[in-house]
Amino acid sequence: MRPPRLSVVLVAHGSRDPRAAAATAALARAVRRLRPDWDVHAAYLDHAGPRPLEVLASLRGRAVVVPLLLTKAFHGRVDIPAVLSSAVDLPVSVTLAEVLGPAASFPAPAFPSLLLDGLVRRLPSDHLDAVVLAAAGTRDAAARATIEWAADALSARLSLPCAVAYASAAPPLPGAAVDLLRASGARRIGVASYFLAPGYLYDLAARSALEAGAVAVAEPLSDAPELARLVAARVEDSLLDVPAAA
């Protein structure tokens, strides 16, 4: 008898905004195209369905849970591990992959090159002279440090100043970051989107930046080819039981 295919469960935060679930479904389809030998599912911690435990309960054999998170803040440290703790009696062996962004706070790891490639792909190339990296925001200082690494990596790739901004939980707002860059002499400021899917906070970040004079705002990463490849890399790393890399 042929062994069951590896199951991969992509776990997103979830949102009341239907665009967010559509973006997650698009990423799941992109991963399926990349790895047709895997059985890929999408699940959501809140708002949308199905929930991760519902999906895991329907599976057999081995499954890898991939947190669709760019930082290891509360959802990555608490919510998703709690799901795995609740799954111990299910007839499936579950492995947890690393979040898509860098997870550690010290020492700083190399920023995932595939994630950086995806940010650059989404960023409009309008002869920019500075960039704001806009994220949802978190009160977790270690998680914010990883977003600073993202901004540093993007700045080095583009050879442009790059400031971090948040739509919630921590200052500055994207509009304030645009103002600071303009005060330093920048005139064509673009916004790179450290978001996996559209929704209320993405809209808030985009509106804040545009009202302050940003010339372009990138779309969320969603189903960017680099993101699908990063998901696959996280799965493969978890199966090898080695530190995640991409």
Image (tube, grey):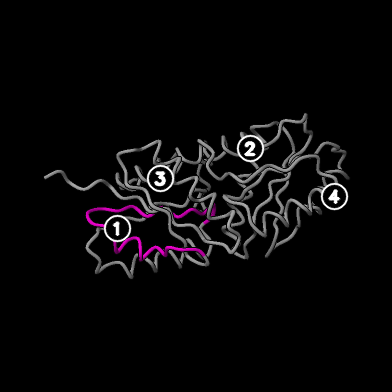
What's the residue type where badge 3 is placed?
Answer: Arg
Q: Tell me what residue is drawn at x 52 percent, y 53 percent.
A: 106
Question: Most extreme residue toward the left, as rendered?
Answer: 1
Of labels 1 and 3, earlier in sequence is 1
Q: Quadrant of the C terminus?
A: top left
| SS at mark 3 in the image | helix
| Residue 13 position within the rendered picture, expressed as x and y whole percent measured from the top left | 52, 61
Q: Are marks 4 and 2 in contact (CB under 8 Å)?
A: no
Within-10-Å neighbours for mark 2: few <14, some 14–19, many 20+:
some
The quadrant in which residue 129 appears is top right
| Residue 42 position within the rendered picture, expressed as x and y whole percent measured from the top left | 43, 54
Question: Which residue is tagged 3?
Answer: 234
Q: Quadrant of the N terminus?
A: top left
Separation of marks 2 and 1 at Cα, in angstroms: 33 Å
Separation of marks 1 and 3 at Cα, in angstroms: 14 Å
Q: Are marks 4 and 1 in contact (CB under 8 Å)?
A: no
Question: Which residue is tagged 2?
Answer: 122
Q: Tell me what residue is drawn at x 29 percent, y 44 percent.
A: 240
Image position of 195 (left or right of 33): right
Separation of marks 4 and 1 at Cα, in angstroms: 46 Å
Disc 3 versus disc 2: nearer the observer: 2
Within-10-Å neighbours for mark 3: few <14, some 14–19, many 20+:
many
Question: Which residue is tagged 1?
Answer: 94
| SS at mark 2 in the image | helix
Of labels 3 and 4, earlier in sequence is 4
| SS at mark 1 in the image | strand
